[in-house]
């Protein structure tokens, strides 16, 4: 079993659009090359530019499972690769002991403990076993740098060795998407093995299309108003400029309130869906909501 | 094919760090397209040859120049436009120094002099003493601060470690063995040094950057250094080099605003926007080296210091003048910053820098 054949980035973009992800040329080319060259795709960009949802959409578009590894500080091999189910092993050992009536063969007992029955496959191992699949390594910048070296090894070999069981190798390398918010510089060695893509906020027309696509109940007019207001908010010097996720939230909130138009009053009561810092909200209110909504 | 390799070489000359491995990936990527359109050629290179946002404008310029094609899309709005040729600025001028300092005969170095030198104000040293001072700074042994990590390590006390206990159990043929325990490991806590390199701080700039180099070398992965002047510059990469002279030369090349004006508020804002908020300042010990002479709006500095204080584990302010007798924090910058710092320290001599290190460790 292999990957569905894709002849061009455009074809992939069409597939992505089918599942609701509107990819621009850069994203489509990046994903296409990642598939063809069997290289991980390293996505960086402001929060809310669709890094994670790209991986989700790729899995849907290619009709393969998505395996997600959320990185965090202190993540280690036991949480990323595999772990032994100790409580079960302990129970098994006790059961063996009781059944044998005190004549337990140590070697046999030990070898019966280290079988795939007691192995807990964590995301990386699962991805190698299930491949073809999309492996999303989310927010790699949050993990420690030791973890990067470990990840590098798994990604370049597409195999891991469980000492007690042997090697697990993916026949088809999984399509790997790594995302980073640039809280820390990821090591060059890891980047070198990846394709690098910097995602930007979508253009106005694309953002309107995304809103219409994600929220069928939103009118063209409201979507345009929300998208252009969010664009203007991004130009202000805010602590956390709103991403696409925020503009979707905003449009959804307005629809839930039964608004068909984004006016000053409607914006004031729903501002909390786009601006997540008190300082940002104060700054926007001080400079006047009308300026943001002006068209 | 040679054209593509030449293009990659031209990019390397323009400062895009694309090694042979990336060039190979580039050629493979181009080969994936049957007849590469200009836009596919553009994306193939951008995806394989670039590695960080700073590379993108350089790549766009290089692509336009090499292929004579306008890039199909505008380069992303880089948070701060880089000025391509950095001016080489001298660190502190060794000869000029302060008037009386330069005229003094060089001191003979003896053990007792070292002790004296440790306590002398760095801004008032003669050139020979400065040379000696560098050695003293290089001898500082910083012990990075630590925080507890998520990861667990085998330990004598702490929670039960089922994995190791089970192994011991197996080794004993299922007999109850000694219980193994594990405990949280300790990891270095991030240290961020923000060094003011404006005109009023120039007698101290060289010594402080050397100090930053020593701290960086002690824990390269968890130390970040930035300079503040009229703009903010990240020096972490330059200071990671082992040799202090190479590191300092690289640092001097990277900083365009030595001995210029001070806009502390804007500098700290730029630091927080680009690095601090995203993670560099989170749970870190942040040390600001500045005399607090703020040319810009002090209220902005106050606002940004409050923001920094909320993000960081501890904020220390080091003012070389704070060590002088009769010092009163009256400078506009210090006055607004003081409510938001955990400590105001002196940093005018090697002795006080050493005290700073233990303060950072304790923070």
Image (cartoon, coloured by chain):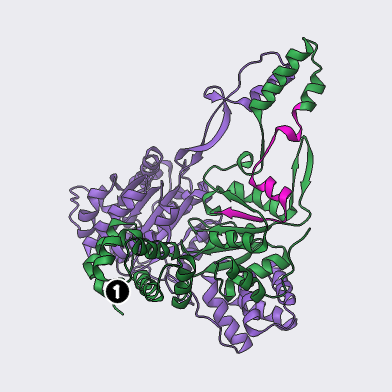
Q: In the current view of this chain or complex, which residue is farthest to the bottom?
A: B68
- Residue under label 1: A293
Q: Which residue is at the front of the view, A223 or A155?
A: A223
Q: Which residue is at the front of the view, A93 or B62?
A: A93
Residue A126 lies in the magenta stretch: yes
Q: Quadrant for residue A119, please give it.
A: top right
Disc 1 chain ID: A
Horizontal side, residue A252 vs residue B301: left or right: right
Image spot of residue A64 (x, y percent)? 68, 57
Q: Which chain is green?
A: A
Q: In the current view of this chain or complex, which residue is farthest to the top?
A: A102
Image spot of residue A98 (x, y percent)? 73, 13
Q: Residue at x 32, y 57 (%)?
A: A277
Q: Which residue is at the front of the view, A117 or A142?
A: A117
Chain B on-screen colour = purple
Image spot of residue B160 (x, y percent)? 56, 23
Q: Residue at x 57, y 31 (%)?
A: B153
Q: Quadrant of the C terminus of chain B?
A: top left
Q: Residue at x 62, y 79 (%)?
A: B42
Residue B289 lies in the magenta stretch: no
Q: Quadrant for residue A269, please give it.
A: bottom left
Position of residue A139 relative to residue A258, above or below, is above
Badge 1 density bin: few <14, some 14–19, many ≥20, Cα 10 Å? some
Q: Which residues are magenta?
A: A113-138
Q: Residue at x 31, y 71 (%)?
A: A262
Q: How many marks?
A: 1
Image spot of residue B105 (x, y percent)? 36, 57
Q: Is residue A239 visible?
A: no
Q: Quadrant of the N terminus of chain B?
A: bottom right
Q: Is residue A153 visible?
A: yes
Q: Secondary structure at mark 1?
A: helix
Position of residue B179 relative to residue B117, above or below, is above
């Amino acid at each position: 079993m292999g990957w569905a054949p894709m002849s061009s980035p455009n074809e992939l973009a069409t597939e992505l659009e089918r599942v609701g992800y509107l990819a621009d040329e850069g994203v489509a080319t990046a994903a296409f090359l990642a598939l063809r060259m069997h290289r991980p795709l390293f996505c960086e960009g402001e929060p809310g530019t669709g890094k994670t949802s790209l991986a989700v959409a790729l899995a849907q578009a290619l009709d393969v499972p998505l395996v997600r590894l959320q990185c965090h500080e202190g993540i280690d091999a036991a949480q990323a690769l595999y772990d032994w189910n100790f409580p079960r092993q302990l129970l098994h050992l006790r059961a063996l002991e009781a059944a044998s009536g005190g004549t337990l063969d140590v070697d046999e007992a030990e070898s019966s403990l280290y079988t795939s029955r007691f192995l807990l496959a964590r995301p990386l191992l699962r991805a190698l076993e299930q491949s073809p699949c999309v492996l999303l390594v989310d927010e790699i910048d949050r993990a420690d740098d030791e973890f990067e070296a470990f990840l590098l090894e798994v990604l370049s070999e597409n195999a891991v060795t469980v000492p007690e069981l042997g090697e697990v190798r993916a026949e088809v390398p999984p399509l790997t998407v790594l995302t980073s918010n640039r809280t820390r510089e990821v090591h060059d060695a890891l980047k070198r093995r990846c394709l690098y893509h910097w995602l930007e906020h979508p253009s106005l027309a694309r953002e309107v299309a995304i809103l219409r696509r994600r929220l069928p109940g939103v009118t063209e007019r409201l979507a345009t108003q929300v998208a252009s207001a969010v664009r203007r908010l991004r130009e202000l010097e805010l602590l956390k400029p709103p991403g696409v996720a925020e503009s979707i939230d905003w449009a959804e909130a307005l629809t839930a309130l039964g608004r068909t138009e984004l006016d000053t009053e409607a914006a004031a009561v729903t501002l909390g869906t786009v601006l997540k810092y008190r300082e940002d909200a104060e700054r926007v209110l001080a400079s006047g909501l009308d300026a943001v909504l002006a068209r | 094919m040679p054209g593509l390799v030449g293009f990659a070489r031209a990019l390397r000359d323009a400062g895009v760090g694309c090694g042979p491995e990336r060039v190979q990936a580039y050629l493979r990527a181009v080969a994936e397209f049957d007849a590469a359109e200009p836009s596919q050629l553009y994306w193939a290179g951008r995806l394989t040859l670039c590695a960080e946002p700073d590379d993108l404008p350089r790549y766009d310029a290089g692509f336009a120049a090499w292929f004579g094609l306008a890039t199909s899309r505008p380069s992303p709005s880089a948070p701060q436009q880089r000025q391509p040729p950095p001016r080489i600025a001298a660190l502190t001028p060794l000869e000029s120094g302060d008037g009386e300092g330069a005229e003094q005969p060089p001191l003979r170095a003896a053990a007792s002099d070292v002790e004296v030198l440790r306590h002398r104000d760095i801004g008032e040293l003669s050139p020979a003493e400065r040379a000696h001072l560098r050695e003293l700074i290089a001898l500082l042994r910083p012990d990075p601060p630590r925080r507890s990590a998520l990861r667990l390590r085998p330990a004598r006390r702490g929670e039960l470690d089922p994995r190791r206990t089970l192994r011991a159990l197996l080794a004993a043929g299922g007999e109850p063995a000694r219980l193994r325990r594990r405990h949280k490991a300790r990891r270095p806590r991030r240290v961020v040094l923000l060094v003011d390199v404006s005109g009023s701080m120039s007698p101290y700039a060289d010594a402080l950057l050397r100090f930053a180099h020593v701290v960086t070398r002690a824990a390269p992965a968890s130390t970040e250094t930035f300079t503040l002047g009229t703009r903010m510059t990240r020096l972490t990469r330059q200071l990671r080099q082992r040799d202090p002279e190479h590191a300092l030369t690289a640092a001097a090349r990277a900083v365009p605003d030595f001995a210029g004006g001070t806009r502390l508020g804007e500098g700290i804002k730029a630091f927080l926007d680009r690095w601090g908020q995203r993670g560099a300042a989170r749970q870190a010990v942040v040390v600001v080296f500045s005399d607090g002479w703020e040319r810009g709006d002090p209220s902005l500095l106050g606002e940004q210091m409050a923001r920094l204080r909320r993000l960081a584990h501890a904020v220390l302010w080091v003012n070389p003048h704070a060590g002088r007798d009769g010092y009163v924090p009256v400078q506009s910058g210090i006055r607004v910053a003081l409510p938001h710092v955990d400590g105001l320290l002196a940093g005018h001599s090697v002795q006080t820098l050493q005290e700073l290190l233990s303060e950072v460790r304790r923070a």
